[in-house]
Image (spheres, rainbow, N blue to C red):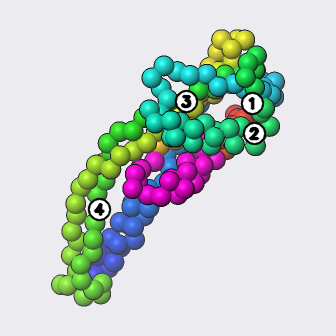
């Protein structure tokens, strides 16, 4: 019985670790908005909201532009149906790293060691605003643990994946 409990611990632990490294996505929207009316968008800045690094700012805008283009929206410099902005923040998160020592199957030889750390978590909040109605119509955010030492191409692919996952919820399905 003791061995069975220890063998259940490993899959549970691996599941928790896998969940910790996925994107965390949230969104909300104006249920009274007719999303079919929105065909164009333009970028606006929120003071203090954009990434402090110009390269990160360009990457975030490019990833969002890619998603909006896939949704059929056309980017304009002015007089667009939608205003688009984002806010990017990095904050410390909490994580627990475990290592299994010993050979599973031998109950007296198996032990677990744990270590806590605070890896940085990046959150990008995307805001879609109807300037004619002066109304926020859609807001979504994606959070993920960051690996700042990773190759910039891999970081961009992770950003693309997060934005793709976020924009699966845009436009909202009618009747939701």
Point out the residue furthest to the front here: 54
Circle 3 — which element?
A: strand
The residue labelled by disc 1 is 75
Q: Position of residue 48 (x, y in %)?
A: 45, 23
The residue labelled by disc 4 is 97
The residue labelled by disc 2 is 69
Q: Quadrant of residue 30?
A: top right
Q: Earlier in the sequence, mark 1 or mark 3?
A: 1
Is residue 39 visible to the viewer in this orientation of the structure? yes
Image quarter in which the C terminus is found? top right
Q: Position of residue 126 (x, y in %)?
A: 57, 32
Instruction: Measure how far apart labels 3 and 4 are at the Cα level.
Output: 32 Å
Q: Position of residue 106 (x, y in %)?
A: 25, 88
Q: Earlier in the sequence, mark 4 or mark 1?
A: 1
Q: Is residue 84 magenta?
A: no
Circle 4 — which element?
A: strand
Residues 69 and 149: in front is 149
Q: Earlier in the sequence, mark 2 or mark 4?
A: 2
The majority secondary structure of the magenta stretch comes to helix
């Amino acid at each position: 019985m003791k061995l069975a409990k220890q063998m259940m611990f490993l899959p549970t632990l691996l599941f928790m670790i896998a969940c910790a490294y996925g994107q965390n996505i949230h969104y909300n929207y104006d249920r009274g908005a007719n999303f079919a009316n929105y065909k164009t968008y333009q970028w606006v800045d929120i003071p203090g909201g954009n990434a402090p690094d110009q390269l990160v700012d360009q990457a975030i805008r490019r990833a969002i532009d890619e998603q909006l283009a896939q949704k059929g929206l056309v980017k304009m410099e002015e007089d667009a149906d939608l205003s688009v902005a984002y806010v990017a923040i990095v904050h410390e998160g909490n994580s627990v790293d475990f290592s299994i020592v010993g050979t599973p199957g031998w109950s007296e030889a198996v032990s677990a060691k744990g270590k806590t750390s605070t890896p940085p978590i990046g959150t990008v909040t995307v805001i879609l605003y109807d300037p004619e109605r002066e109304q926020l119509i859609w807001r979504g955010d994606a959070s993920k643990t960051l690996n700042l030492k990773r190759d910039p191409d891999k970081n961009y692919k992770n950003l693309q994946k997060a934005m793709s996952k976020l924009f699966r919820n845009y436009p909202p399905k009618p009747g939701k």
